Amino acid sequence: MVMVRRFDGNSDALAHGIIVPLLYTADDATKLVQSAKFPPAGQRGYGSPFPMEKFGGQSLSLVDYLQQANDSLLTILDAIAKVPGIDVLFVGPFDLGNNIGHPILDGTMHPELKEAITKVQEVAKVNEKRTGIYATSGDQAREFADQGFHMISVVADMVALPAAMTSALSTAKGSLANSALNMAKGVASKISGTRG
């Protein structure tokens, strides 16, 4: 028996939100909300042959994530956070670090980058928004959770997949080496047994 998840009407494609990088103005954020949210919060068309009531409440459950990736955004962050329909301020530490002149090169965040991230959290709190951030490990994700972030991207597929494949290949090579060694021992014993 296959269990099929019933469409619960939370979003048209069961997405919980979108991340939009490089918003430069509050007007950009307003246009985003108007384009992404269903009425009454936005102007997005339903584009469906199904009755409108099937989509009731869509705008209430679709979450929009903003990814801060440039230092000029820090100066207008408060205006963006005030835009109705913006629910989460999402920090991309690598992008933000690059754009404020303090890239993360050795896994260590520069103090000014930490301050910028703290500013995002402060602005979010004042404006009653949630915060999100990208982490590179489970340990870092735990640190961010302890700092009060609400949404944490623990690992990206471009990091997780190669790591998993490398581990699997390493295991396979180890098994292959052991198999070859055992096969060689078996052949050697047969050879020594026939000579013996």
Image (cartoon, rainbow, N blue to C red):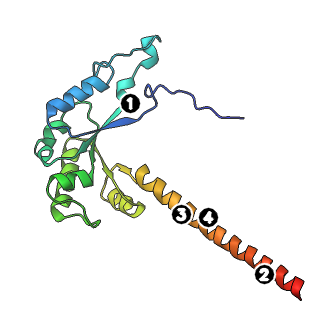
Q: Which residue is mark 1?
A: 61
Which type of secondary structure does the marked residue at label 3 adopt? helix
Among numbered discs 1 and 3, the one appearing first in the sequence: 1
Q: Residue furthest bottom?
A: 196
Point 19% across, 54% down: residue = 98
Are there few (<14), some (14-19), or many (20+) residues within 10 Å of tag 4? few
Q: Which residue is mark 4?
A: 172
- Between residue 99 and residue 137, name the one nearer to us: 99
Residue type beneath disc 4: Ala
- What's the distance in space between the residues labelled 4 and 3, CA to CA? 9 Å
Q: Which mark is residue 188?
A: 2
Which type of secondary structure does the marked residue at label 1 adopt? helix
Residue 156 appears in the picture as rendered: no
- What's the distance in space between the residues labelled 2 and 3, CA to CA? 31 Å
- What's the distance in space between the residues labelled 1 and 2, CA to CA? 68 Å
Point 38% across, 50% down: residue = 153
Are there few (<14), some (14-19), or many (20+) residues within 10 Å of tag 2? few
